[in-house]
Image: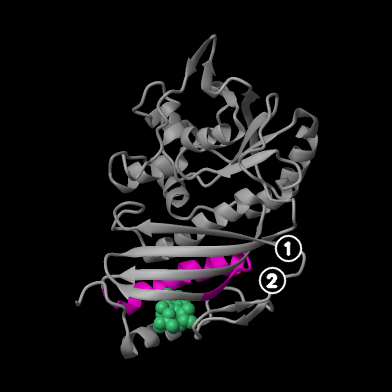
Amino acid sequence: METGREMKGRGEFGLIGRFFASLGASREDVVLGVGDDAALLDPAPGHQLALAVDTLVEGVHFPASTDPFDIGHKALAVNLSDMAAMGADPAWATLALTMPRHDAEWLARFSEGFGTLARRFGVALVGGDTTRGPLTITVQVGGLVAPGRAMRRDGARPGDLVCITGTLGDAGLGLRLALGEATLGEGAEYFLDRLNRPTPRVEAGRALATIATAAIDLSDGLAADLGHLLEAGGVGATLDAARLPVAPEVKRLARERPWWRWPLTAGDDYELCFTVSPSRRGAMERALATCGCPVTIIGTIGAEPGLRITEGSTTVSFEERGGYDHFE
Ligand code: ADP
Ligand code: MG
Protein backbone atom coordinates (compact mmCIF):
# COMPACT_ATOMS: atom_id res chain seq x y z
CA MET A 1 0.00 0.00 0.00
CA GLU A 2 1.33 3.40 -0.90
CA THR A 3 -0.18 5.47 1.89
CA GLY A 4 0.88 4.93 5.48
CA ARG A 5 4.03 3.00 4.62
CA GLU A 6 7.30 3.94 6.17
CA MET A 7 9.40 6.34 4.16
CA LYS A 8 12.10 3.80 3.56
CA GLY A 9 14.96 3.95 1.17
CA ARG A 10 17.24 6.83 0.36
CA GLY A 11 14.55 9.42 0.88
CA GLU A 12 13.86 8.57 4.48
CA PHE A 13 17.43 8.13 5.62
CA GLY A 14 18.51 11.21 3.75
CA LEU A 15 15.96 13.36 5.46
CA ILE A 16 16.55 11.87 8.91
CA GLY A 17 20.26 12.50 8.57
CA ARG A 18 19.75 15.99 7.25
CA PHE A 19 17.18 17.29 9.69
CA PHE A 20 17.11 15.04 12.75
CA ALA A 21 20.52 13.43 13.23
CA SER A 22 21.79 15.99 15.73
CA LEU A 23 18.87 18.19 16.65
CA GLY A 24 18.58 19.91 20.00
CA ALA A 25 21.12 20.00 22.80
CA SER A 26 24.10 17.67 22.92
CA ARG A 27 24.22 15.89 26.25
CA GLU A 28 26.88 13.76 27.91
CA ASP A 29 24.26 11.27 29.11
CA VAL A 30 23.39 10.31 25.52
CA VAL A 31 25.60 7.29 24.83
CA LEU A 32 23.98 6.64 21.45
CA GLY A 33 21.47 8.95 19.73
CA VAL A 34 19.78 8.90 16.32
CA GLY A 35 21.01 6.20 13.95
CA ASP A 36 20.81 2.84 15.71
CA ASP A 37 17.85 0.61 16.54
CA ALA A 38 17.39 2.36 19.88
CA ALA A 39 18.96 5.21 21.76
CA LEU A 40 21.20 4.46 24.73
CA LEU A 41 20.95 6.85 27.65
CA ASP A 42 22.90 7.03 30.86
CA PRO A 43 20.61 8.83 33.33
CA ALA A 44 22.20 10.40 36.38
CA PRO A 45 22.19 7.90 39.27
CA GLY A 46 19.68 8.47 42.06
CA HIS A 47 17.02 9.99 39.83
CA GLN A 48 13.60 8.89 38.69
CA LEU A 49 12.69 8.97 35.01
CA ALA A 50 9.60 11.04 34.12
CA LEU A 51 8.14 10.05 30.72
CA ALA A 52 5.40 11.79 28.75
CA VAL A 53 4.11 11.58 25.18
CA ASP A 54 1.73 13.79 23.21
CA THR A 55 0.44 13.78 19.65
CA LEU A 56 -0.51 16.76 17.51
CA VAL A 57 -2.79 16.11 14.53
CA GLU A 58 -3.27 18.65 11.75
CA GLY A 59 -6.79 20.03 11.78
CA VAL A 60 -7.34 18.85 15.35
CA HIS A 61 -4.52 20.44 17.34
CA PHE A 62 -3.43 23.11 14.88
CA PRO A 63 -4.95 24.65 11.75
CA ALA A 64 -3.51 23.50 8.42
CA SER A 65 -2.21 27.03 7.84
CA THR A 66 0.17 26.88 10.84
CA ASP A 67 3.83 27.76 10.18
CA PRO A 68 5.89 24.53 10.36
CA PHE A 69 8.35 26.31 12.70
CA ASP A 70 5.48 26.74 15.16
CA ILE A 71 4.35 23.12 14.73
CA GLY A 72 7.87 21.95 15.61
CA HIS A 73 7.98 24.28 18.58
CA LYS A 74 4.58 23.33 19.89
CA ALA A 75 5.02 19.56 19.46
CA LEU A 76 7.94 19.74 21.88
CA ALA A 77 6.50 22.50 24.09
CA VAL A 78 3.40 20.52 25.05
CA ASN A 79 5.62 17.70 26.30
CA LEU A 80 7.98 20.04 28.14
CA SER A 81 4.89 21.44 29.80
CA ASP A 82 4.15 17.94 31.15
CA MET A 83 7.68 17.77 32.52
CA ALA A 84 7.13 21.18 34.13
CA ALA A 85 3.94 19.98 35.76
CA MET A 86 5.86 17.09 37.33
CA GLY A 87 8.74 19.31 38.45
CA ALA A 88 11.07 17.24 36.26
CA ASP A 89 14.14 18.34 34.34
CA PRO A 90 13.58 17.53 30.64
CA ALA A 91 16.49 15.69 29.02
CA TRP A 92 15.66 13.60 25.92
CA ALA A 93 13.03 13.47 23.23
CA THR A 94 11.96 11.07 20.50
CA LEU A 95 9.93 12.20 17.49
CA ALA A 96 7.48 10.11 15.46
CA LEU A 97 6.66 12.13 12.38
CA THR A 98 3.95 11.19 9.87
CA MET A 99 3.69 13.51 6.90
CA PRO A 100 2.00 13.43 3.51
CA ARG A 101 5.14 14.06 1.45
CA HIS A 102 8.86 14.72 1.65
CA ASP A 103 8.99 18.52 1.68
CA ALA A 104 12.50 19.77 2.45
CA GLU A 105 11.38 23.34 3.03
CA TRP A 106 8.69 22.24 5.49
CA LEU A 107 11.15 19.96 7.29
CA ALA A 108 13.74 22.72 7.57
CA ARG A 109 11.24 25.05 9.27
CA PHE A 110 9.80 22.30 11.44
CA SER A 111 13.19 21.12 12.68
CA GLU A 112 14.28 24.71 13.30
CA GLY A 113 11.28 25.29 15.56
CA PHE A 114 11.76 21.98 17.35
CA GLY A 115 15.54 22.37 17.65
CA THR A 116 15.48 25.95 18.91
CA LEU A 117 13.19 25.06 21.81
CA ALA A 118 15.09 21.82 22.50
CA ARG A 119 18.39 23.66 22.81
CA ARG A 120 16.82 26.29 25.05
CA PHE A 121 15.79 23.62 27.54
CA GLY A 122 18.80 21.32 27.14
CA VAL A 123 16.86 18.53 25.43
CA ALA A 124 18.55 16.13 22.99
CA LEU A 125 16.58 14.46 20.17
CA VAL A 126 17.71 10.84 20.45
CA GLY A 127 15.48 8.94 18.03
CA GLY A 128 12.19 8.66 16.26
CA ASP A 129 10.28 7.25 13.36
CA THR A 130 9.29 8.72 10.00
CA THR A 131 6.26 7.58 8.03
CA ARG A 132 3.97 8.79 5.25
CA GLY A 133 0.38 9.74 6.02
CA PRO A 134 -1.77 12.63 7.26
CA LEU A 135 0.38 15.14 9.14
CA THR A 136 0.73 13.85 12.71
CA ILE A 137 3.52 14.57 15.15
CA THR A 138 4.15 12.48 18.25
CA VAL A 139 6.85 13.57 20.66
CA GLN A 140 7.93 11.70 23.73
CA VAL A 141 10.06 13.42 26.37
CA GLY A 142 12.04 11.92 29.21
CA GLY A 143 13.13 13.94 32.19
CA LEU A 144 14.82 13.48 35.53
CA VAL A 145 13.53 14.15 38.99
CA ALA A 146 14.89 13.31 42.43
CA PRO A 147 12.91 10.57 44.21
CA GLY A 148 9.94 11.95 46.12
CA ARG A 149 10.19 15.38 44.51
CA ALA A 150 7.82 14.98 41.57
CA MET A 151 4.56 16.94 41.77
CA ARG A 152 1.55 14.70 41.39
CA ARG A 153 -2.07 15.50 40.76
CA ASP A 154 -3.41 13.88 43.90
CA GLY A 155 -1.95 15.93 46.75
CA ALA A 156 -4.40 18.86 47.17
CA ARG A 157 -5.92 19.19 50.66
CA PRO A 158 -8.80 21.36 51.96
CA GLY A 159 -7.49 24.82 52.83
CA ASP A 160 -4.77 24.77 50.14
CA LEU A 161 -4.55 27.79 47.84
CA VAL A 162 -5.26 27.27 44.12
CA CYS A 163 -2.64 29.08 42.02
CA ILE A 164 -1.85 29.49 38.35
CA THR A 165 1.13 30.85 36.49
CA GLY A 166 0.67 33.44 33.74
CA THR A 167 -2.69 34.22 32.18
CA LEU A 168 -5.69 32.24 30.94
CA GLY A 169 -7.42 32.34 27.56
CA ASP A 170 -4.69 34.00 25.49
CA ALA A 171 -4.32 30.98 23.21
CA GLY A 172 -8.09 30.71 22.93
CA LEU A 173 -8.20 34.23 21.54
CA GLY A 174 -5.17 33.41 19.37
CA LEU A 175 -7.09 30.52 17.81
CA ARG A 176 -10.11 32.68 17.03
CA LEU A 177 -7.76 35.22 15.45
CA ALA A 178 -6.01 32.49 13.43
CA LEU A 179 -9.36 31.17 12.19
CA GLY A 180 -10.63 34.67 11.37
CA GLU A 181 -13.40 34.39 13.97
CA ALA A 182 -12.17 37.47 15.82
CA THR A 183 -10.19 40.53 14.87
CA LEU A 184 -7.92 42.71 16.89
CA GLY A 185 -6.06 45.71 15.54
CA GLU A 186 -3.19 46.12 17.94
CA GLY A 187 -1.70 43.23 19.85
CA ALA A 188 -2.94 40.31 17.70
CA GLU A 189 0.65 39.07 17.43
CA TYR A 190 0.88 38.48 21.17
CA PHE A 191 -2.17 36.23 21.22
CA LEU A 192 -1.10 34.32 18.09
CA ASP A 193 2.27 33.76 19.74
CA ARG A 194 0.61 32.41 22.86
CA LEU A 195 -1.26 29.94 20.64
CA ASN A 196 1.61 28.90 18.42
CA ARG A 197 4.69 29.25 20.59
CA PRO A 198 3.79 28.54 24.19
CA THR A 199 6.71 28.71 26.61
CA PRO A 200 6.60 25.70 28.92
CA ARG A 201 6.98 26.65 32.61
CA VAL A 202 9.91 24.32 33.18
CA GLU A 203 11.84 26.52 35.64
CA ALA A 204 8.67 27.28 37.59
CA GLY A 205 7.85 23.57 37.82
CA ARG A 206 11.32 22.78 39.15
CA ALA A 207 11.10 25.62 41.66
CA LEU A 208 7.70 24.43 42.91
CA ALA A 209 8.59 20.75 43.23
CA THR A 210 9.11 20.76 47.00
CA ILE A 211 6.56 23.47 47.71
CA ALA A 212 3.31 22.65 45.86
CA THR A 213 1.00 19.92 47.15
CA ALA A 214 -0.31 19.06 43.66
CA ALA A 215 0.16 20.33 40.10
CA ILE A 216 -1.12 19.90 36.56
CA ASP A 217 -0.40 21.74 33.34
CA LEU A 218 -3.21 23.48 31.47
CA SER A 219 -3.77 21.95 28.05
CA ASP A 220 -7.53 21.40 27.88
CA GLY A 221 -8.64 24.49 29.82
CA LEU A 222 -8.53 25.27 33.53
CA ALA A 223 -12.00 23.87 34.25
CA ALA A 224 -11.14 20.45 32.82
CA ASP A 225 -7.55 20.27 34.06
CA LEU A 226 -8.24 21.58 37.55
CA GLY A 227 -11.15 19.12 37.51
CA HIS A 228 -8.63 16.26 37.10
CA LEU A 229 -6.58 17.58 40.00
CA LEU A 230 -9.65 17.87 42.22
CA GLU A 231 -10.83 14.37 41.33
CA ALA A 232 -7.39 12.89 41.98
CA GLY A 233 -7.29 14.50 45.40
CA GLY A 234 -10.93 13.77 46.28
CA VAL A 235 -11.52 17.48 46.93
CA GLY A 236 -13.28 20.51 45.40
CA ALA A 237 -12.40 24.16 44.79
CA THR A 238 -13.97 27.59 44.82
CA LEU A 239 -12.46 30.18 42.49
CA ASP A 240 -12.94 33.94 42.58
CA ALA A 241 -13.83 35.19 39.06
CA ALA A 242 -12.46 38.65 39.84
CA ARG A 243 -9.03 37.18 40.51
CA LEU A 244 -8.70 35.18 37.29
CA PRO A 245 -5.70 36.57 35.38
CA VAL A 246 -7.30 37.25 32.01
CA ALA A 247 -6.22 39.82 29.41
CA PRO A 248 -8.75 42.63 28.90
CA GLU A 249 -9.00 41.62 25.21
CA VAL A 250 -10.06 38.10 26.17
CA LYS A 251 -12.66 39.44 28.56
CA ARG A 252 -13.96 41.90 25.98
CA LEU A 253 -14.12 39.43 23.08
CA ALA A 254 -15.66 36.55 25.04
CA ARG A 255 -18.88 35.46 23.33
CA GLU A 256 -19.70 33.12 26.19
CA ARG A 257 -21.68 34.12 29.24
CA PRO A 258 -20.60 34.58 31.91
CA TRP A 259 -17.38 35.93 30.37
CA TRP A 260 -15.13 33.68 32.45
CA ARG A 261 -16.50 30.53 30.82
CA TRP A 262 -14.26 31.10 27.79
CA PRO A 263 -10.86 31.51 29.50
CA LEU A 264 -11.77 28.51 31.67
CA THR A 265 -12.49 26.21 28.73
CA ALA A 266 -10.57 27.45 25.67
CA GLY A 267 -7.45 25.39 26.37
CA ASP A 268 -3.88 25.48 25.04
CA ASP A 269 -2.71 27.74 27.90
CA TYR A 270 0.28 25.57 28.88
CA GLU A 271 0.45 27.30 32.23
CA LEU A 272 0.74 25.43 35.53
CA CYS A 273 -2.14 25.08 37.97
CA PHE A 274 -0.97 24.02 41.41
CA THR A 275 -2.03 23.97 45.02
CA VAL A 276 -0.01 25.07 48.02
CA SER A 277 -0.60 25.10 51.76
CA PRO A 278 -1.18 28.68 53.03
CA SER A 279 1.85 28.23 55.29
CA ARG A 280 4.05 27.85 52.17
CA ARG A 281 2.64 30.83 50.31
CA GLY A 282 5.69 33.02 50.96
CA ALA A 283 8.10 30.27 49.89
CA MET A 284 6.05 29.74 46.72
CA GLU A 285 6.03 33.43 45.83
CA ARG A 286 9.76 33.76 46.41
CA ALA A 287 10.52 30.63 44.37
CA LEU A 288 8.52 31.88 41.39
CA ALA A 289 9.88 35.42 41.66
CA THR A 290 13.39 33.94 41.38
CA CYS A 291 12.55 32.51 37.96
CA GLY A 292 10.54 35.56 36.88
CA CYS A 293 7.29 33.62 36.68
CA PRO A 294 4.04 35.51 37.37
CA VAL A 295 1.58 33.74 39.66
CA THR A 296 -1.98 34.41 40.84
CA ILE A 297 -3.88 32.85 43.72
CA ILE A 298 -7.34 32.28 42.27
CA GLY A 299 -9.16 30.33 44.97
CA THR A 300 -9.08 27.66 47.64
CA ILE A 301 -9.49 23.92 47.96
CA GLY A 302 -12.46 22.64 49.95
CA ALA A 303 -13.65 19.23 51.12
CA GLU A 304 -16.82 19.34 49.02
CA PRO A 305 -16.17 17.89 45.54
CA GLY A 306 -16.76 19.99 42.41
CA LEU A 307 -15.68 23.32 41.00
CA ARG A 308 -17.45 26.52 42.04
CA ILE A 309 -16.99 30.07 40.76
CA THR A 310 -17.76 33.07 42.92
CA GLU A 311 -18.55 36.39 41.24
CA GLY A 312 -19.57 39.19 43.58
CA SER A 313 -22.12 37.73 45.96
CA THR A 314 -23.13 34.76 43.81
CA THR A 315 -21.49 31.37 43.61
CA VAL A 316 -22.25 29.02 40.74
CA SER A 317 -21.29 25.43 40.28
CA PHE A 318 -19.20 24.80 37.17
CA GLU A 319 -21.06 21.72 35.98
CA GLU A 320 -20.02 21.14 32.43
CA ARG A 321 -16.37 20.32 32.17
CA GLY A 322 -15.73 22.09 28.92
CA GLY A 323 -12.26 21.46 27.63
CA TYR A 324 -11.64 19.35 24.59
CA ASP A 325 -12.61 15.70 24.60
CA HIS A 326 -11.58 13.84 21.43
CA PHE A 327 -14.30 11.21 21.81
CA GLU A 328 -17.31 13.35 22.68
P1 ADP B 1 14.09 1.13 12.67
O1 ADP B 1 13.45 0.63 11.40
O2 ADP B 1 15.19 0.28 13.18
O3 ADP B 1 13.08 1.54 13.67
P2 ADP B 1 14.24 3.66 11.41
O4 ADP B 1 14.56 3.44 9.99
O5 ADP B 1 12.84 3.90 11.80
O6 ADP B 1 14.85 2.46 12.24
O7 ADP B 1 15.12 4.87 11.96
C1 ADP B 1 16.53 4.91 11.81
C2 ADP B 1 17.11 5.78 12.88
O8 ADP B 1 16.67 7.10 12.71
C3 ADP B 1 16.70 5.36 14.29
O9 ADP B 1 17.80 5.61 15.15
C4 ADP B 1 15.58 6.28 14.61
O10 ADP B 1 15.50 6.51 15.99
C5 ADP B 1 15.96 7.53 13.85
N1 ADP B 1 14.79 8.32 13.39
C6 ADP B 1 13.87 7.98 12.45
N2 ADP B 1 12.99 8.98 12.26
C7 ADP B 1 13.34 9.98 13.08
C8 ADP B 1 12.82 11.26 13.37
N3 ADP B 1 11.73 11.75 12.77
N4 ADP B 1 13.45 12.00 14.31
C9 ADP B 1 14.53 11.52 14.95
N5 ADP B 1 15.09 10.34 14.71
C10 ADP B 1 14.50 9.56 13.80
MG1 MG C 1 11.45 2.86 12.97
Position in image of residue 151 (x %, y %) = 67, 46
Circle 1 residue: 47
Magenta part of the chain: 101-126
| Residue shown at the point (34%, 72%) measured from the top left | 106
Q: Which residue is mark 2?
A: 43
Q: Amino acid at mark 2?
A: Pro
Q: Position of residue 105 (x, y in %)?
A: 34, 76
Prevailing SS of the magenta stretch: helix
Secondary structure under the numbered disc 2 in the rendered image: loop
Identify which amino acid the numbered label 1 is placed on.
His
Contact flag, marks 2 and 1 (Cβ < 8 Å) = yes
Residue 87 lies in the magenta stretch: no
Q: Residue at x 52, y 79 (%)?
A: 38
Q: Is residue 19 visible to the viewer in this orientation of the structure?
A: no
Number of marks in the image?
2
Q: Is residue 37 above or below residue 229?
A: below
Is ligand 1 within 8 Å of the beta carbon of the residue shown at mark 1?
Answer: no
Residue at (60% x, 68% y) in the render: 123
Relative to the observer, which residue lies in front, 242 or 281?
281
How dense is the environment of label 1, judged by Cα within 10 Å: few (below 14), some, or many (20 and up)?
some
Give the camera-side residue of 218 and 242. 218
- Which structural element holds mark 1? loop
